[in-house]
Amino acid sequence: MGGFRNTTPLAAPCQWWVAPSVLPLYRQKGYPLTSSIMESTVKQVSRRIKGTEKFWSSEGGEAVLQLRGDYLSDSEPMDAHWRRATTNANGFRAYGVSA
């Protein structure tokens, strides 16, 4: 009896694999060739969420993740948000009327 042998064929080929002949073109276009950028971003976000003495509800955790993602985003949605917020600021808070 030999060792374990997997005879099940893959359901679909791996889509993330890139032929080595394409790598020079990817370098020329400035595409990242490693996952280190994504891994670093995940680590940054994880530190913000899982730091010591931090406890989040599901909704609160999702909100913090969204904000952190917006701050790290290349499209800078938070800069646009603060430009709009300061443009529309009139010095008064809009309080709801209690019943």
Image: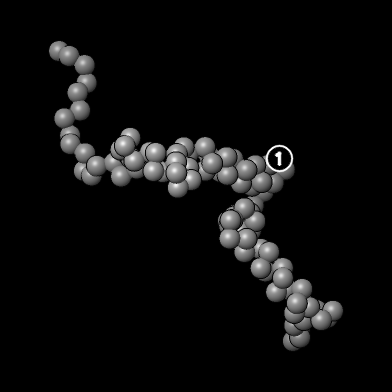
* Furthest residue toward top: 1
Residue at image coords 48%, 42%: 32
How many marks are shown on the rendered structure? 1
Structural crowding at the residue carrying mark 1, measured as other residues with C-alpha within 10 Å and reported as few (<14), some (14–19) or many (≥20): few
Choose top left, top right, bottom left or bottom right for residue 79. bottom right
Q: In percent of the image, x 58 and y 60: which residue is there?
A: 75
Q: Which amino acid lies under the numbered mark 1 shown in the image of this protein? A: Thr
> In the rendered image, which quarter contains the N terminus?
top left
Q: Residue at x 73, y 73 (%)?
A: 85
Q: Which residue is mark 1?
A: 52
As displayed, is residue 59 above or below residue 80? above
Q: In the image shown, does 7 or 84 lie closer to the viewer?
A: 84
Please state, as top left, top right, bottom left or bottom right, where the C terminus lies in the image. Answer: bottom right
Q: Position of residue 14 (x, y in %)?
A: 29, 41
Report helix, strand or loop for mark 1: loop
**In the image, is residue 51 above or below residue 92?**
above
Task: Please state the horizontal and vertical placement of residue 38, each as a whole percent of the image.
Answer: 52, 43
Task: Tell me the residue at 19%/23% (across/down).
Answer: 5
Query: Is residue 13 found left or right of 52 in the rendered image?
Result: left
Q: Is residue 60 visible?
A: no
Q: Please determine whether, in this image, residue 78 is positioned above or below residue 2.
A: below
Most distant residue in the right direction = 91
- The x, y position of residue 81, in whole percent, is 67, 69
